[in-house]
Amino acid sequence: MSYLVLGLILLTVTLSACAQLALKLGVSRPKMVNAMQSSLVDTLLAAMTSPLIWTGLIIYILSVAMWLWVLSKVDLSVAYPFVGISFLVTLAFGMLLLGENVTPMRIIGTLFITIGCILVGRSA
């Protein structure tokens, strides 16, 4: 696997985690929380007018476009396990940016996933 492909895989995975962060921040805003406790129509309207939710969706679109290119270059069985690295990035975002409580078991589990990704990547 070339460094370009590996770099794009890692960028795609990171963008996916960034999209998750933007979506989480978007649904955590008071306007969205209140709308979700009201009705489906209010929820949809609040989501459609949320800059953070739109940001998350746009990041996902970019990520998917890059992912399609990656899939055209490497086997799915090689590329897809790298998606597991997003668990590590998302764990870091949750802990560092959202102040989430991260337990040792969650860290250990995430590290196992990351090790698996590394092993699969080295096999390519």
Image (cartoon, rainbow, N blue to C red):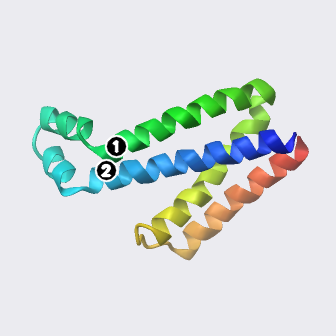
* Quarter of the figure with the C terminus: top right
Q: Which residue is mark 1?
A: 53
Task: Estimate how packed mark 1 is, as few (under 14), some (14 to 19) or many (20 or more) residues with alpha carbons within 10 Å.
Answer: many
* Quarter of the figure with the N terminus: top right
Looking at the image, which is closer to me, 78 or 71? Answer: 71
Q: What's the residue type where badge 2 is placed? A: Gly
Q: Which residue is mark 2?
A: 26
Question: What residue is drawn where x is 64% and y is 69%?
Answer: 108
Could you say whether the residue bearing mark 1 is in a helix, strand or loop? helix
* Label 1 with label 2: CB-CB less than 8 Å: yes
Question: What residue is drawn where x is 64% and y is 33%?
Answer: 66
The answer to whether 15 appears left or right of 72 in the picture is left
Q: What's the residue type where badge 1 is placed? A: Ile
Mark earlier in primary sequence (1, 2):
2
Where does residue 101 sit, x and y in percent of width and height?
A: 43, 73
User: Residue pushed farthest top?
Assistant: 72
Where does residue 64 sit, x and y in percent of width and height?
A: 57, 32
Question: What residue is drawn where x is 54% and y is 35%?
Answer: 62
Where does residue 42 sit, x and y in percent of width and height?
A: 13, 37
Could you say whether the residue bearing mark 2 is in a helix, strand or loop? helix
Please determine whether, in this image, residue 29 is positioned above or below residue 75.
below
Task: Estimate how packed mark 2 is, as few (under 14), some (14 to 19) or many (20 or more) residues with alpha carbons within 10 Å.
Answer: many
Using the numbered discs, state the Cα–Cα distance from disc 1 to disc 2 in whole angstroms.
Answer: 5 Å
The quarter of the picture where residue 5 lies is top right
Q: Which mark is residue 29?
A: none
Question: What residue is drawn where x is 65% and y is 49%?
Answer: 84
User: Residue pushed farthest left?
Assistant: 38
The quarter of the picture where residue 39 lies is top left
The answer to whether 110 appears left or right of 55 in the picture is right
Where does residue 71 sit, x and y in percent of width and height?
A: 72, 28
